[in-house]
């Protein structure tokens, strides 16, 4: 019997803290812009004649035109960042599939439990790749895992390559010793090659950041848009521009902050704890699932 789906209330979606650091930045910016809006409203009340002479109401028309421009910029920014996030997730999906396929074939041809070293290499490779992508090779957790793997002649500059190299040697030695046929070797080779491809694809994302000039340009456009907003609509809406500006900040700036987060799918924002980011790929969980799958295949 199917269990009923849990009810999701709109208030929990709107007010829940999905990503702490993003909401913290939004909160700070919202406070500053709210104070700025209050100052503009008070200035409009005190210096109404000056505002009329400057024809401030015409700024609202300019603001409407600029809204179209800023929407295109934000949409392009989010799409670019999401493409990087999705590419990273897709590559880790390929890693899951190739790890399972290699485990199944190796277990059928040789037996994973008959070669504990290969089993350890394959099960723990995703975790090593995670440390490599997050530049955490020197952390105690990674060093403990490397000691467990006992890699001979490890290339510290690229440990994932060292593990793949050892797995290739093991498979090739079985072929040279006649324990597997050439056809069986060729059946396993594409999965090892695909794991190398996945590593390179993830490094491409990691080593090709979004140009800083583009991000700065978008930030300046958003700042200008939000600073102009109170002047364009203060005469028409008065103090109502404050909640209106809060909504604009929450949506537009929130999208920009999410885009800034997901453009680095492997390590989150500036080395912060990845567990704080809903948008960061949960590489720990994926790595643990791959290890569990490989060990389950070995014991099947």
Image (cartoon, grey):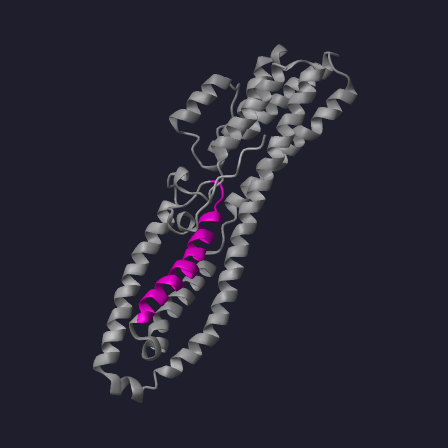
Residue farthest front in this picture: 1
Nearest the eye: 168 or 106: 106
Q: Is residue 164 left or right of residue 253?
A: right
Q: Is residue 80 visible?
A: yes
| Percent coordinates x, y for residue 63 in the rendering | 42, 75
Nearest the eye: 11 or 113: 11
Highlighted magenta segment, given as a residue range:
240-266
Quarter location, residue 201: top right
| Percent coordinates x, y for residue 122 in the rendering | 58, 23
Q: Is residue 158 visible?
A: no
Residue at 37% in and 41% down: 272
The mark total stands at: 0
Q: Is residue 171 left or right of residue 152?
A: right
Say above or below: 66 vs 93.
Answer: below
Residue at 45% in and 41% down: 267
| Percent coordinates x, y for residue 193 in the rendering | 66, 31
Residue farthest left in this picture: 46
Say above or below: 126 vs 42.
Answer: above
Quarter location, residue 232: bottom left
Quarter location, residue 45: bottom left
Q: Is residue 249 magenta?
A: yes
Judged by its main secondary structure, the magenta piece is helix
Q: Is residue 38 magenta?
A: no
In the rendered image, which quarter contains the N terminus? top right
Nearest the eye: 271 or 67: 67
Say above or below: 197 vs 212.
Answer: above
| Percent coordinates x, y for residue 156 in the rendering | 48, 28
Nearest the eye: 44 or 170: 44
Residue at 40% in and 64% down: 248
In the rendered image, which quarter contains the C terminus? top right
Say above or below: 283 vs 210.
Answer: above
């Amino acid at each position: 019997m199917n269990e009923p789906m849990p009810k999701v209330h709109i208030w929990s979606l709107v007010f829940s803290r999905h990503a702490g650091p993003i909401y913290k930045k939004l909160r700070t910016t919202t406070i500053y812009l709210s104070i700025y809006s209050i100052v503009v409203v008070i200035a409009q009340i005190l210096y109404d004649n000056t505002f009329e002479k400057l024809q401030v109401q015409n700024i609202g028309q300019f603001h409407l035109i600029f809204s179209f421009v800023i929407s295109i910029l934000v949409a392009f920014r989010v799409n670019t960042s999401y493409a990087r996030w999705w590419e990273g997730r897709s590559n880790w999906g390929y890693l899951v599939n190739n790890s399972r396929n290699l485990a199944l074939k190796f277990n059928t041809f040789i037996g994973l439990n008959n070669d504990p070293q290969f089993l350890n290499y394959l099960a723990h490779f995703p975790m090593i790749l995670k440390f490599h992508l997050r530049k955490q090779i020197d952390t105690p957790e990674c060093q403990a895992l490397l000691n467990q793997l006992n890699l001979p002649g490890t290339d510290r500059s690229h440990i994932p390559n060292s593990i793949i190299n050892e797995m290739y040697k093991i498979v090739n030695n079985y072929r040279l010793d006649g324990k597997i046929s050439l056809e069986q070797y060729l059946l396993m080779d594409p999965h090892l090659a695909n794991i190398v491809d996945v590593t390179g694809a993830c490094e491409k994302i990691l080593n090709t950041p979004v140009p800083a000039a583009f991000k700065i340009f978008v930030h300046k456009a958003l700042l200008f848009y939000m600073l102009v907003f109170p002047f364009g609509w203060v005469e028409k809406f008065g103090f109502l521009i404050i909640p209106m500006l809060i909504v604009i900040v929450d949506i537009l700036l929130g999208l920009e902050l999410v885009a800034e987060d997901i453009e680095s799918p492997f390590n989150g924002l500036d080395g912060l704890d990845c567990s704080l980011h809903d948008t960061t790929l949960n590489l720990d969980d994926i790595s643990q699932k791959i290890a569990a799958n490989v060990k389950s295949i070995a014991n099947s």
